Image (cartoon, coloured by chain):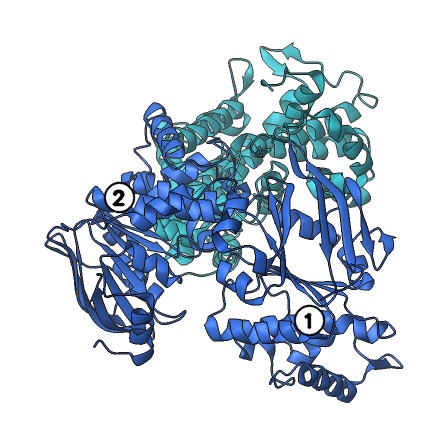
Chain colours: A cyan, B blue
């Protein structure tokens, strides 16, 4: 038998088996839910040279989450987890804002760049600490990163003296609240970080080595992968992403709030990674999936407001949707619920001739 | 054994998976009071047939008749209730509970909702006793070696029928590769139990890769190939060569070739030299030399220190005494990286836990070692990578020949080949193979042994560890004998060295 002609069912099958199928399907479904409540949901209009619309807002407000989740993806792929990202967001914002607020001229570019540099260096140092504890000292990631998660908020408050520092810096405002080429500037920042991450992991061998370490740590050691180095690098990268998100959040509000900046963002980020199809056990990861996952969460938050879920029930509503999303993504659950249909459809797939060497069905 | 009627009859069994027909119309029957071997290469359909029988898979065609009645087996639980018990290769018990608790778990004798501990222990002790085993049922299961745990698993599954039926008990006992991690004495103990159960009228279905064991314990065998029935024979009527030919479907040219092959005689200068290398709790300090192009075989019982020796030479464990010199340079051996840098490669005996990354593809697994040595910043160019991978998939005949296939889905033999390819690609000077032929079928076994011979001819040194002495004897120039975590002798292979000579050395612990 020659290779079977590509039929509609097999094309459909290839589509539904793509690793991004379910995340994208959920995202589209969530977006569509909004239409009956807000008929012009998909409309984008130009006002004062800036584009406005619900879609633009979702990406804009979702930017910090996407950044944090992208970094988190790599950490999770090594079999770890980073709970400290929310605190790193707060520390970065606090350091940067307090440096800017001390300047005579808050609009001076040099001062703003230096302030951002200080903030990001602090973030990377937090990542180095996490990586050191996990990779070098062998502490469980969840415990190791818990330290900065808790202590980091204290550090952020020390930096701001327990106050909310407000600043008035036009250049700094650009990152999280400004516009460029009609679009929110933060969208460009996110696009750049995502592009760099994908290039860094897929153009080099970093992605493969990360997946190997997460997929089988002992085998990776025996194959000569310097997993300690890779893990430390990944935690540093994750913290850097959180730091950029911290700049974005403090820039958007022109204030540093040690208590509330990035609060619980680590949980949303972990959720985004999982919705994107990366297993918490480590191994295979998908940056694209994570971006979609973060957009799903942001869309959900937006949807809750547009369809008017009462404030006191919106966390419960969010939880319910998340449960449904996770169930839909679970192959086991799908097999149970849609099993009868799946089995009936099975013979449609071309079966290998019985006399040939057994062929292995490879699903990805 | 003149039973008029089989206790179990499977007729025209068909099982399909997407894209694969795993079983096409297989007939199988099992008589009470016999030990029946199910034979076939990896992928022949043995596991599938067992899983259909034990309710793990639902069948797509055919009928199963138990005691003359057609039955539908929808789940492992239904299989158990019907009197079909299974013990798998991996023991599925709770090591932290006592032996008695494990035997009765899920069906404890209760009164008013309270477990009758005294009765439970007494009944467990009786069951163990009745089967002629000497096990303290109150001790935690983990205090016993794996072999005993396996016996407990059998006691548990056989006992299951007794307690809830009216003396119906277990009719069919399925043992899937129970011996693969047992040593000789433990195997004998298992066989004693199997014979006892057989004499009580239980029909035992036995799967093992060890042909000698099949011939020792089994009465009848069924041979499968590519999902079809090849034949059913009395063990006494079919010799080993005939059986292997049935299994692989061709004459034994490959193996014959190996038997006749001459060892390369001109091994070169010393490549690896270990002096006083040792590790407390692992292996006593030893001296060892491996020459260029030499195959050094290690013989010894399970747990005699074979693997520990190999791991020290690779830096997988850190030695606490001695030094290693490779090609004239001393190597620190504090991590595998040091050894890899010096040209040593190591295929672990535990393919799944220490070898492969199951989620990654065949291609990714193959290039992993080479990529690791280049570091993450220098990826292997795609064209060069694909060429290398294609070359080794072809050379080692890895199936499916699809570099995109996930390695976890391959059969054991093909996984082993992927592991080999991974290291061959790095062109090592010394290749350490720890049990490379364990759990893989006879065809792949022969291929891997042939490969070792040709690698040695090309000048690669090989440290070869295998449980089967014939294998070690056939391939090695020098045989290192281990006993009780000590390298007790190094024999130069020659006409006077035989397996019994090696066994003697193992037994006496000294070199005559």
- Tell me where residue A209 appears, x and y as whole percent: 40, 41
Q: Of marks 1 and 2, which one's residue comes earlier in the chain?
A: 1
Task: Residue B139: name its quadrant.
Answer: bottom right
State how many labels appear: 2
Residue highlighted by disc 1: B198
Q: Is residue B281 above or below residue B65?
A: below
The residue at the point 52 percent across, 42 percent down is: B410
Q: Secondary structure at mark 2?
A: helix
Q: Is residue B294 above or below residue B172?
A: above
- Tell me where residue B160 appears, x and y as whole percent: 77, 71
Residue highlighted by disc 2: B455
- Tell me where residue B365 appears, x and y as whole percent: 42, 40
Q: Quarter of the image containing the C terminus of chain B?
A: bottom left
Query: Looking at this view, is B272 or A20 the one in front?
Result: B272
- Tell me where residue B209 appears, x and y as whole percent: 52, 56
Q: Quarter of the image containing the N terminus of chain B?
A: bottom right
Q: Chain of mark 1?
A: B
The residue at the point 44 percent across, 32 percent down is: A197
Is residue A102 at all visible to an observer of this figure? Answer: no
Query: Looking at this view, is B64 or A25 the one in front?
Result: B64
Q: Is residue B128 above or below residue A27?
A: below
The residue at the point 75 percent across, 57 percent down is: B76
Disc number lying in front (1 or 2): 1
* Residue B71, numbered label: none
Residues at marks 1 and 2 touching, judged by CB atoms closer than 8 Å: no
Is residue B79 at all visible to an observer of this figure? Answer: yes
In the image, A253: left or right of A88?
right
The residue at the point 78 percent across, 45 percent down is: A316
Q: Chain of mark 2?
A: B
In the image, B17: left or right of A360?
right
């Amino acid at each position: 038998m020659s290779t079977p002609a590509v039929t509609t069912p097999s094309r459909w099958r290839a589509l539904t088996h793509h690793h991004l199928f379910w995340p994208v399907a959920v995202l589209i479904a969530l977006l569509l839910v909004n239409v009956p409540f807000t008929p012009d949901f998909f409309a984008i209009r130009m006002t004062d040279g800036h584009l406005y619309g619900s879609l633009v807002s979702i990406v804009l407000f979702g930017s910090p989450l996407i950044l944090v989740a992208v970094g988190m993806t790599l950490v999770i792929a090594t079999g770890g987890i980073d709970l400290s990202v929310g605190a790193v967001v707060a520390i970065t914002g606090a350091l940067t804002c307090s440096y800017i607020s001390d300047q005579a001229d808050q609009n001076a570019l040099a001062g703003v760049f230096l302030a951002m540099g200080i903030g990001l260096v602090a973030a990377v140092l937090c990542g180095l600490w996490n990586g050191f504890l996990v990779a070098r000292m062998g502490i469980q990631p969840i415990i190791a990163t818990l330290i900065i998660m808790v202590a980091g908020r204290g550090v952020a408050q020390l930096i701001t003296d327990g106050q909310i520092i407000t600043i008035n810096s036009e250049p700094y405002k650009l990152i999280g609240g400004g516009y460029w080429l009609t679009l929110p500037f933060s969208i460009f920042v996110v696009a750049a970080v995502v592009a760099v991450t994908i290039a860094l992991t897929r153009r080099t061998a970093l992605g493969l080595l990360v997946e190997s370490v997460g997929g089988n740590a002992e085998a990776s050691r025996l194959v000569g992968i310097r997993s300690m180095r890779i893990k430390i690098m990944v935690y540093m990268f994750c913290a850097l992403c959180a730091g950029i998100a911290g700049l974005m959040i403090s820039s958007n509000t022109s204030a540093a709030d040690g208590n509330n900046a990035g609060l619980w963002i680590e949980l949303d980020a972990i959720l985004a990674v999982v919705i994107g199809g990366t297993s918490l056990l480590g191994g295979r990861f998908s940056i694209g999936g994570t971006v979609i996952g973060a957009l799903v969460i942001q869309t959900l938050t937006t949807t809750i407001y547009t369809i008017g879920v009462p404030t006191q029930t919106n966390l419960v509503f969010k939880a319910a949707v998340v449960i449904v999303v996770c169930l839909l993504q679970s192959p086991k659950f799908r097999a149970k619920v849609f099993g009868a249909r799946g089995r009936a459809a099975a013979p449609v797939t071309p079966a290998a001739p019985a006399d040939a060497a057994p062929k292995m069905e490879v699903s990805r | 054994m003149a039973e008029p009627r089989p206790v179990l009859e499977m007729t025209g069994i068909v099982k399909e998976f997407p894209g694969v027909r795993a079983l096409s119309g297989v007939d199988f029957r099992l008589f009470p009071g016999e030990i029946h071997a199910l034979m076939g290469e990896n992928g022949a359909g043995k596991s599938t047939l067992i899983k259909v029988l034990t309710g793990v898979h639902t069948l797509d065609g055919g009928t199963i008749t138990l005691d003359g009645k057609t039955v539908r087996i929808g789940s492992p639980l239904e299989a158990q209730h019907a009197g079909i018990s299974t013990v798998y290769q991996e023991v599925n018990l709770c090591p932290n509970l006592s032996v008695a608790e494990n035997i009765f778990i899920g069906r404890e004798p209760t009164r008013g909702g309270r477990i009758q501990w005294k009765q439970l222990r007494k009944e467990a002790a009786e069951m163990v006793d009745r089967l002629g085993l000497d096990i303290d049922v109150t001790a935690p299961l983990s205090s016993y070696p794996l072999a005993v745990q396996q016996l407990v698993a059998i006691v548990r599954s056989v006992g299951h029928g007794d307690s809830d039926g009216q003396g119906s008990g277990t009719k069919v006992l399925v043992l899937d590769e129970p011996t693969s991690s047992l040593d000789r004495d433990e195997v004998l103990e298992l066989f004693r139990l199997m014979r006892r159960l057989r004499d009580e009228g239980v029909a035992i279905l036995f799967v093992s890769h060890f042909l000698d064991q099949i011939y020792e314990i089994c009465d009848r065998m069924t041979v499968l190939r590519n999902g079809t029935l090849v034949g059913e024979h009395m063990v006494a009527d079919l010799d080993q060569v005939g059986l292997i030919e049935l299994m692989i479907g061709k004459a034994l040219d490959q193996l014959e070739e190996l038997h006749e092959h001459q060892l390369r005689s001109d091994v070169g200068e010393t490549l690896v030299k270990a002096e006083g290398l040792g590790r407390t709790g692992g292996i006593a300090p030893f001296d060892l030399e491996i020459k260029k192009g030499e195959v050094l075989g290690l013989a010894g019982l399970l747990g005699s220190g074979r693997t520990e020796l190999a791991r020290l030479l690779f830096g997988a464990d850190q030695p606490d005494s001695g030094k290693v010199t490779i090609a004239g340079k001393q190597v620190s051996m504090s991590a595998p990286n040091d050894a890899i840098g010096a040209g040593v490669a190591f295929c672990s005996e535990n393919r799944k836990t220490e070898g492969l990354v199951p989620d990654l593809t065949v291609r990714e697994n193959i290039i992993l070692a080479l990529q690791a040595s280049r570091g993450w910043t220098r990826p292997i160019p795609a064209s060069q990578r694909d060429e290398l991978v294609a070359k080794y998939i072809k050379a080692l005949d890895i199936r499916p020949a699809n570099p995109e296939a996930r390695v976890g889905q391959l059969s054991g033999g093909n996984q082993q080949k992927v592991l080999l390819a991974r290291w061959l690609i790095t062109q090592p000077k010394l290749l350490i193979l720890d049990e490379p032929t364990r759990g893989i079928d006879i065809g792949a076994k022969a291929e891997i042994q042939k490969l070792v011979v040709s690698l040695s001819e090309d000048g690669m040194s090989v440290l070869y560890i295998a449980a089967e002495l014939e294998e070690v004897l056939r391939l090695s120039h020098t045989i290192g004998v281990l006993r009780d975590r000590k390298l007790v002798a190094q024999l130069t292979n020659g006409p006077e060295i035989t397996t019994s000579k090696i066994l003697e050395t193992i037994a006496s612990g000294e070199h005559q």
